[in-house]
Image (tube, rainbow, N blue to C red):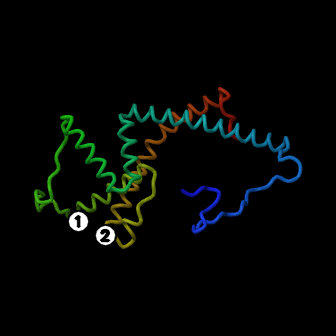
């Protein structure tokens, strides 16, 4: 086995020159002003982080009160960021574990069992585009211009869905923002955060 310091004679590995900064002359200390400036910025960011954590906790409580199950939502968020094949493999493992533990699970039809009437009509595809736009709008995201470009047949339905989702978002976000801002104002009054100008 090769050592990290010296390559074997026949090895193509070579030792790279040390390019780390060298200490010059006296000391490598910083002045007091630099330390105090960074200390002030660190304290300010830590205060912001504390308020943000409180707001996030309050938001999760509001979501729980609205009927959202946090573990399920976090699992779906995790799945949304993964490769679809990995998600299907994970769900397959969960299903297998459930079967082994006699936990009731649903069944899925095979491709051959699906009736011919399940092919989506243009109206159903339009409703699907509307629903996709609605979900993007209500979650505060932009419409999907890649899935529904300018020349797409259902772009108008997608944009209508997005606008409807944005309207619901604006109606529902105000009470959430009021609840969160009340908590943020209370934190500023408690001295946890400097009031913003």
Q: If you read the primary sequence from the N terminus, does the residue marked by circle 2 or circle 1 appear first?
A: 1
Residue 93 occupies which quadrant of the picture?
Answer: top left
| Quadrant of the frame with the N terminus | bottom right
For label 1, the residue is 122
Left or right position of 141 against 85: right
Residue at the far right: name it.
26
For label 2, the residue is 153
User: Which secondary structure lies at badge 2?
Assistant: loop
Q: Position of residue 117 (x, y in %)?
A: 12, 61
Left or right position of 74 against 11: left
User: Which secondary structure lies at badge 1?
Assistant: helix
Residue 195 occupies which quadrant of the picture?
Answer: top right
Q: Residue at x 16, y 46 (%)?
A: 107
| Quadrant of the frame with the C terminus | top right
Q: Nearer the viewer, residue 103 or 134?
A: 103
Alpha-carbon span between mark 2 and mark 1: 9 Å
Left or right position of 162 against 21: left
Q: Nearer the viewer, residue 110 or 185?
A: 110
Q: Position of residue 87 (x, y in %)?
A: 33, 51
Q: Residue at x 69, y 35 (%)?
A: 194
Q: Nearer the viewer, residue 66 or 108?
A: 108
* Residue 30: image tag: none
Residue at the far front: name it.
9
Cβ atoms at labels 2 and 1 below 8 Å apart: yes
Q: Position of residue 129 (x, y in %)?
A: 31, 60
Q: Position of residue 89 (x, y in %)?
A: 29, 51
């Amino acid at each position: 086995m090769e050592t990290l310091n010296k390559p074997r004679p026949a090895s193509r590995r070579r030792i790279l020159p040390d390019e780390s900064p060298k200490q010059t002359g006296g000391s490598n200390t910083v002045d007091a002003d630099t330390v105090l400036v960074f200390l002030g910025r660190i304290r300010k960011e830590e205060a912001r982080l504390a308020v943000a954590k409180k707001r996030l906790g309050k938001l999760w409580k509001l979501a729980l009160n609205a009927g959202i199950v946090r573990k399920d939502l976090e699992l779906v968020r995790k799945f949304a960021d993964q490769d679809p094949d990995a998600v299907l493999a994970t769900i397959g493992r969960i299903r297998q574990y459930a079967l082994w533990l006699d936990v009731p699970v649903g069944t899925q039809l095979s491709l051959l069992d699906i009736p011919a009437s399940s092919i989506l009509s243009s109206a159903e595809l339009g409703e699907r585009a509307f629903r996709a736009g609605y979900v993007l709008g209500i979650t505060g995201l932009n419409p999907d211009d890649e899935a529904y470009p300018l020349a797409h047949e259902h772009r108008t339905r997608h944009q209508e869905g997005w606008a409807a989702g944005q309207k619901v978002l604006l109606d529902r976000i105000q009470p959430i923002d009021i609840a969160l801002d009340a908590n943020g104002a209370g934190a500023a009054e408690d001295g946890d955060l400097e009031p913003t100008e």
